[in-house]
Amino acid sequence: MNKGIDRDLLLANSNVLSALAVLAIIGLMIMPVNPTVLDLLITFNIAFAVVILLVSLYLKEPLQFSSFPSLLLIVTLFRLSLNVASTRLILSKGGAGKVIASFGDFVIGGNYVIGVIVFAILVIVQFVVITKGSGRISEVSARFTLDSMPGKQMAIDADLNTGLINEAEARRRRAQVASEAEFFGAMDGASKFVRGDAVAGIIITIINIVGGFIIGMLQMGMTAGESLRQFTRLTVGDGLVSQIPALLISTAAGLVVTRQSSSMNLGQSLTMQLFRQPKAIYLASGSLIALGLVPGLPTLPFLTLGVVFGIVGRLLSSRVESIDRQDAADEAMAVEETAAPADRGPGHDLFVTDAMELELGYGLLSLVDQARGGDLLNRITNIRRQIGSELGVLVHPIRVRDNLQLGAHEYVIKLKGVALARAELRPDRLLAMSTGGGEAIEGLPTTEPAFQLPALWIDPARKTVAEMEGYTVVEPTAVLATHLSETIRAHADELLTRQDIKDMCESVREFAPALIEDLIPDKVPVNTLHNVLRGLLHERIPVKDIVTILETLANHVGSGGGVDHLLEKVREALRRTISSLYVEPDGQVYVVSLHPETEAVLAQAANDSERAGAVVLEPLFAQTFLEKLEKTLQAVYSRGKPPVLLVPTPMRLFLKRLIEPTFPALPVMGYTEVTPNTSIQSAGIVSTQGAHHAHAAKA
């Protein structure tokens, strides 16, 4: 418990201790330091550098040492302050403690020329190899990390949008991506301090030798030889106690920035990867033995190491064989778990395709990149929520991915792997659609993809001008989102699955258990309910009132009619919902009706078709009827009133199927689907008067 309290106390005061440590480091540059204290500080510097190096070896990912850039700056400042303190002692007293003197004597070994050369080599290794390489790695890592941020963010958003991860996991991954970018960016800057520290060490060494040589002769009464020996020894020792920690920390910096995220630390990774190939060890063993047999080369070291490598290779072979057998067993188990489709049934994952997909050309990736202001993924989430609330069905996650085979500004909406709609966007422009009455503006002609309206791609700077001329101006993301939402609404019936029906019934069971137990599946099979709901969604009728739908099916399921009959009965029960769908802001429902003669012909055709099980209608009459209907609709649309075709209920479904290939978006209502309080306004009458008789006479 005391250890826990001490640790908590240390963490609670760590910010104060850090501030005091930085102030103390700065104080070393100003105040003189006792040689004994300097020995302790130099020893601590070396030990701390060793700790940092060992910690970097045990990292599994760089972010486990995210404070390394800041620590690197503090350690560099500490090392420079020690240089200043030791230089002050060397030049003022001709000595700087036992640690510096001992290092100098050990390296020089009585030969000052050799000592200086060894020290110079160490400095060159530190400056040219370690520091420069570590700095370059930091620079490249920072650049690649920043360049990969949009792709990582898009992958996270795509996983969230497709339901592979939840919001909390997405936030964690986004924070990790941001932390990686900040870390490698900070390492890029911190590496410049390390390189500057190496340069400062070289300059300080030169100053110590030259300055000490002059001070020794002029102020301390030494001869030239004595002064050179004394200050060279101290300078080399000072340089060593400074460069050795710098070398260790530069190596640690290189290890940190080159470390890839893994479940193993560096030692485990090297062992697994370096010694996983015993053949390489055998070849090395054979090469060493062959070199040992070459005349003139020392036989003992080559043969000894050759035999050692051979023994290691043999030990590794048995170990690798055991690992391979385990991997084979794991793979066999995995194969059993992912057996052939015939063994797992038709629902195997290999046959599962995404219900909806959105593929983007590379020029549209900015729309999903939140770092560049893209909000398409958020819009898609809102679309799914809105349509689900509007229609009463679950809209499954939509997979968003890039497709390099598409044009740069092209996108494709897919349904169950098949392209359903495609269009092009200009992400650098705005889409302007004329509402009529304004003057023409400059722009690139195009077609609004959701409703096939003529439009223009305009420069964002001309948005105000376009709006003043009566144009509706929208962003490219809104264009795509609208197209996607309309596509989902138009094909909601194809997105509804049997599993969705079962989930829906389970939800109803929570608040109406008696209804479900009485109907499903004894009276109303799941297949029947599925087909009825799909029929409603096909005409964009919400199925939120599932209780009314189930009760209506229960009342009519035994009346002898098929799914079409049940569908029409359900529509009658939902007449308030259906009527409200087509009420305009002025409270009117604008309807197009049939001329009595035309209605009689179509009613007879509907009866004949029901008995025959196929459409029975004279082709020329059907063509004439569709032409007359088109003219009537054009006149209604020109007045800005979206119409509804109102017909007798018995022929409603027949007429819907007749006109759907030509007018897929035209609603068709039966008389019994209109509530008494609905205000009906006639917008036109379709008449084929005389056409039926003329065609009959011609025949």
Image: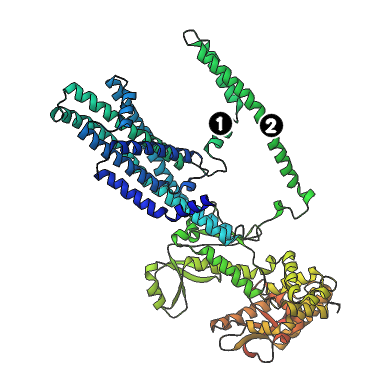
Where in the figure is residue 168, as x and y percent of width and height? 56, 60
User: Horizontal placement of 253 versus 231: left or right?
Assistant: right
Of residue 216 and residue 178, the one placed in the foreground of this image is 216
Where in the figure is residue 407, as x and y percent of width and height? 51, 55
Q: Which residue is mark 2?
A: 322
Q: Secondary structure at mark 2?
A: helix
In this rendering, is residue 651 above or below 166?
below
Crowding at dot 1, Cα within 10 Å, few <14 / some 14-19 / many 20+, comes out as few
Of residue 240 and residue 318, the one placed in the foreground of this image is 240
What's under tag 1, amino acid-wise?
Answer: Leu
Crowding at dot 2, Cα within 10 Å, few <14 / some 14-19 / many 20+, comes out as few
Where in the figure is residue 128, as x and y percent of width and height? 34, 33
Among the 4 quarters of the image, the one containing residue 622: bottom right
Residue at the extreme front of the image, as rendered: 2
User: Horizontal placement of 685 versus 372: left or right?
Assistant: right
Q: Residue at x 38, y 36 (%)?
A: 46
Among the 4 quarters of the image, the one containing residue 598: bottom right
Which quadrant, please, contains the C terminus? bottom right
In this rendering, is residue 96 above or below 291?
below
Q: Which residue is mark 1?
A: 274
Q: Residue at x 66, y 78 (%)?
A: 667
Residue 690 visible to an observer of this rendering: no
Q: Residue at x 66, y 59 (%)?
A: 416
Q: Residue at x 38, y 51 (%)?
A: 18
